[in-house]
Image: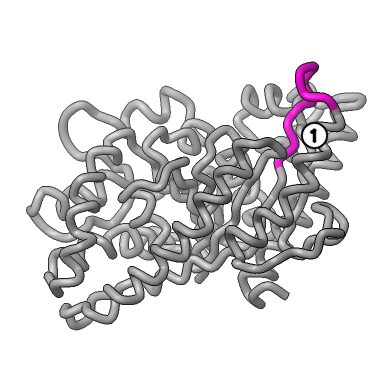
Amino acid sequence: MKTIAFFNNKGGVGKTSLVYHLAWMYARLGVNVLAADLDPQANLTSMFLNDDELEPLWPEIGERPTVYGALRPLLEGTGDVAVPHVVEPEPGLGLVVGDLLLATAEDELSSQWPACLDRKPRAFRVLSALARILRQGAAEIDAKVILLDVGPNLGAFNRAALVTADSVVVPLAPDLYSLQGLRNLGPTLRRWREEWKERRERNPVAGLDVPKGAMRPIGYIVMQHAVRLDRPVKAYRRWMERIPAVYGNAVEGETMPTHVHTTDHDSNCLATLKHYRSLMPLAQEARKPMFALKAADGAIGGHAAAVRGCYRDFRALAKTVARRVANGRS
């Protein structure tokens, strides 16, 4: 089983939509997959579930069958993590439901990070909690892949979420903000990886399944946004051409040749996805991925051709990500 986090500390790059569509695609390809909503905004959950389905999962009083509900006994000191509730939109596809209350775990996860250096058992139980919850959730549906949707910040909760990940995929948009985000993200991932390695070796709790925290970057995905009137084509190309060097230097710690361009020559680029602006409203209304839209959903004429192209794109991306996770960067 492999855990893949989709992470960028710059928001608005299509990260949640990417996780949603890849989860559906892996299920369609016969690979059991668990999607975990670890963003306190719970946007991934809202893509899978409508308000009527979600409201019973977020009661004001009582048990919450969400990722926070599984974490709460440990946070409140009443026990260890609970077995998570997994919603199955279809066979082979599971969702660990997100929760806005995840934001309240930030302080506890922050305070337990330095406590690991003192070999305190509770610190390791807390910081391994998300990994253990996700493993239990994956076991419920025999998932071979866990996809993590992680919020756009470099806080303590995201650090604990990233510790659970074997691999990290970075969604990007071709703009200044994404490039600046890369410059922050790369050094932070390397620091977290080294700090967790030091802490992990101090675990005093026999039998506690502590994640390795590999957090290995396997590449980036450029999510093309609709071209706006205030962003000329020349400026768009300029940002696209700068991505390989910035990613290589900041995330991989390598110097990229000046002739390397995003789509054709950079081995770090997993895909450049189109902006399916005509399909997304239809998909949201139908509560299904864009590549699964039918004529009954309004996907007729040019939309039908776009659906077929979308399916090909996400199928190829799913296979590329799986290959990178299995074989490293080859």
Q: Is 48 rendered above or below residue 312?
A: above
Q: Which residue is mark 1?
A: 236
Residue beneath the point at 61% across and 66% down: 252
Q: Position of residue 318 (x, y in %)?
A: 70, 57
Q: Is residue 60 above or below residue 178?
A: above
- Which residue corresponds to the image point at 17% horizontal and 78% vertical from the top-left? 205
Q: Along the horizontal axis of the image, is 31 left or right of 202? A: right
- Report the magenta residues as a range: 223-232
- Decide if residue 66 is on the left or right side of residue 81: right
Residue 194 position within the rendered picture, expressed as x and y whole percent measured from the top left: 39, 71
Q: Quadrant of residue 176?
A: top right
Tell whether 97 sits left or right of 247: left
Can residue 94 be seen here?
no
Residue 180 among magenta residues: no
Label 1: few (<14), some or many (≥20) within 10 Å? some
Q: Secondary structure at mark 1?
A: helix
Identify which residue, 246 or 86, lies in the foreground.
Answer: 246
Residue at 26% across, 50% down: 70
Instruction: Indicate left or right for 251 with 163 as reference.
Output: right
Seen from the viewer's position, the closer of residues 101 and 222 is 222
Q: Quadrant of the C terminus?
A: bottom right
Q: How many marks?
A: 1
Residue drawn 27% across the image and 36% down it: 101
